[in-house]
Image: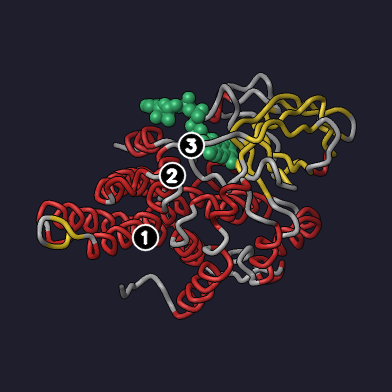
Amino acid sequence: MQSIYFKEEHNLLRDMVRRFVETEIKPHGDAWERDGMVPRETLRKMGELGLFGLRFPEKYGGSDMDVFAMIVLAEELGRSTFGGVSVTVMVHTAMSSPHLVYAGSEAQIRKYLPDILSGESICAIAVSEPAAGSDVGGIRTRAVRDGDDWVLNGSKMFISNGYYGDLYFVAAKTDLEAKGSRGISMFIVERDTPGFKIGRKLEKFGIHCSDTAELFFEDCRVPAENLLGEENKGFYAVMRNFQNERLSIGAMATSESATALDLTLEHLRNRQAFGGTMIEKQGIRQRLATSQCKLLAAQQLLYHAAWLDSAGKDAVAEISMVKAHCAETAQEVMYNCQQFHGGMGYIRDSPIERMVRDARLHAIGGGATEVMLEEVAKRWQ
Ligand SMILES: Cc1cc2nc3c(=O)[nH]c(=O)nc-3n(C[C@H](O)[C@H](O)[C@H](O)COP(=O)(O)OP(=O)(O)OC[C@H]3O[C@@H](n4cnc5c(N)ncnc54)[C@H](O)[C@@H]3O)c2cc1C
């Protein structure tokens, strides 16, 4: 579909990612799902293509593109039908590493960014904890200054890229007296830091090729220069980057659903029953046409919110709507796609069965639907 939002540079990027998905992801996705990981070799190839620096300044080796480049990347990965690949890549490039570029010092950026861009160093964002997910202000991991170090104690839960990652952006309380969201700071923690332990690789309902881990900090000494951004202002950094995260989840959710819808239409065109093809049945075609309308509306909301954000407007309400609405639309569309695949939609590792499972995360991770709707309601006058 023609769009006012995408320019020639986005179309070229889209073609490149689409080719990569066809040749380097789709043939291997089933094996990666079984292995529970996306091979580093593939991530390095994406790094070589420049896909990990799309929005970062040219002076640091990035391409200085806009938010629509990130959307193109998320949309095209979504077409792969392997949600775990999208999560692995988008967590690295759209949800974690922007923390370094937006808040890091020149020295921190120069030290860490080259390996992040090349895919040599894969990043994770560690905010959620066993006792605090939706309520970020409730985190208990703490960091206490001791000489030239910060000493971290606590644990993190559900961390994507946590098991095989290299570089972790960790939120911890630095002002233990401060209430709620105040007194949180961000730290850069390298994988082999003493006192930093990677716990279980968590078994999940979906996105099997995305690795998810528990993390533990036991008197973990992080050099003072690894404080990222301003002390006690980490909550605002997390919130700021949540906008990126939520737009990319909106893009994954809509594109995965559109792909599932295409697969379903193809299936129904070929499936014969009651003297004709299934796609001729009015009850089915109208329900899928409704899904298509809702998807297009969700996608346009995504583009509108991204445009507001890129124009420098306060788009927190709209981006929260994107996260809630695209994720919930995906649940409905995926339900219909599975329903009309009949028994095949229920068989383990058929593309639809996998996509239904993978899409469930969109309504929970990165701010559950209800939490997003609170963000909208809070802004009522
Ligand atoms: C596969 C996976 C990957 C993840 N990756 C990461 C990651 O890389 N980094 C990271 O930091 N976190 C990550 N998370 C954590 C994720 O962001 C949290 O699970 C999510 O924010 C919900 O937090 P919670 O699990 O603690 O649920 P809770 O906060 O306990 O909430 C449970 C449910 O209650 C409802 N709810 C919560 N608050 C309200 C409210 N105010 N009003 C009404 N209903 C409400 C919602 O439906 C919510 O799902 C990941 C999670 C999963 C499952």
Cα distance between the residues tagged 2 and 1: 18 Å
- Residue 235 image offset from top left, x and y in percent: 59, 36
Q: CA distance from mark 3 to mark 1?
A: 20 Å
Q: Disc 3 vs disc 1: Cβ atoms closer than 8 Å?
A: no
x and y, in percent, of residue 183 in the image: 64, 29
Q: Nearer the viewer, mark 2 or mark 1?
A: 2
The kind of residue tagged 1 is Thr
| Residue 331 visible in the snapshot | yes
Circle 2 sits in a helix, a strand or a loop, which is it? loop
Q: Quadrant of the C terminus?
A: top left
The residue under the point 48% across, 37% down is 205
Q: Residues within 10 Å of mark 3 (few under 14, many from 20)?
A: few
Residue at the image position 83 percent from the left and 38 percent from the top? 193
Give the residue displayed 35% in from the left and 43% down from the top: 346
| Left or right placement of residue 275 versus residue 329 in this view | left
Dot 2 corresponds to which residue?
348
N-term-proximal mark, 3 vs 1: 3
Secondary structure under the numbered disc 1 in the rendered image: helix
Out of 145 and 67, give the one closest to the viewer.
67
The correct choice, above or below, for 118 with respect to 321 in the image is below
* Disc 3 target residue: 205
